[in-house]
Amino acid sequence: MFVLFLDFDGVLHPEHCHESKHFCCLPWLEGAVRRFPEYKLVVTSTWRLQYPLEQLRQRFSPDVAARIDGATPRYCELTDVPDTLVGYEREAECRAWLWAHQAIHLPWLAVDDRSWLYRPFCRSLFLVDGKKGLTAVAGEQLVTRLHELL
């Protein structure tokens, strides 16, 4: 099993876009993850704080939605953040999810547009240009990164 942590704003659509464009980049993500059935998806997006997981799954195609295995905990609710992760909220949330699911040693990748939420040079971060979201080119680069983890 492998884990792909997924942000929405700036990844599945450009950051601060009109809601009519929400999830316009989803086909590129779904095309990439369909090539790797070994990966579970976990939502890291702040959307997880506003909508129930089942409602978030409805945004995805049924086959991809079935692979969404939950959402990360909120940083403010974590009780034991290692010193090395203080201030790197999203990475701490990802690692807390891995720990809670006894998957701390599994390969993982986070698709996000905000590098400052992860430690500098985090090898598990696939950085997307938030002004564009996940493009066709970035989708192919994601395929390469997912393949490298296998």
Image (tube, rainbow, N blue to C red):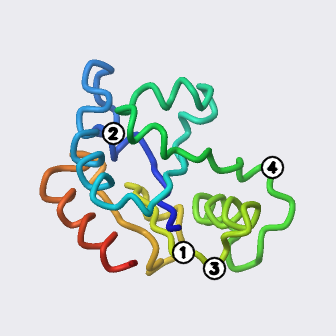
Could you give the CA–CA distance between mark 4 and mark 1, rounded to whole angstroms? Answer: 20 Å
Query: Which numbered disc covers residue 49?
Result: none
Could you give the CA–CA distance between mark 2 and mark 1, rounded to whole angstroms? Answer: 21 Å
Decide: is 78 above or below 81. above
Query: Residue at image x 67%, y 74%?
Result: 104
Query: Which numbered disc covers residue 77?
Result: 4
Pick whichever, 28 or 118, lies toward us: 28
| Residue linked to disc 3 | 105
Q: What residue type is disc 4 on?
A: Glu
Q: Is residue 89 left or right of residue 47?
A: right
- Counting the numbered discs, the total is 4
Q: Earlier in the sequence, mark 2 or mark 4?
A: 2
| Residue linked to disc 1 | 119
Q: Secondary structure at mark 2?
A: loop
Q: Secondary structure at mark 1?
A: loop
Give yes or no for contact between labels 3 and 4 (Cβ–Cβ under 8 Å). Answer: no
Instruction: Specify the quadrant of the image occupied by residue 95.
Output: bottom right
Residue 120 pos. (x, y %): 48, 78
Q: Earlier in the sequence, mark 2 or mark 1?
A: 2
Decide: is 148 above or below 28. below
Q: Residues within 10 Å of mark 1 (few under 14, many from 20)?
A: some
Residue 85 pos. (x, y %): 67, 72
Give yes or no for contact between labels 3 and 1 (Cβ–Cβ under 8 Å). Answer: no
Query: Residue at image x 60%, y 27%?
Result: 50
Could you give the CA–CA distance between mark 2 and mark 4, rounded to whole angstroms? Answer: 26 Å
Q: What residue type is disc 1 on?
A: Arg
Query: Which numbered disc covers residue 15?
Result: 2
Comparing labels 3 and 1, the label whose residue is closer to the camera: 3
Q: Earlier in the sequence, mark 3 or mark 4?
A: 4
Instruction: Specify the quadrant of the image occupied by residue 119.
Output: bottom right
Q: Earlier in the sequence, mark 3 or mark 1?
A: 3
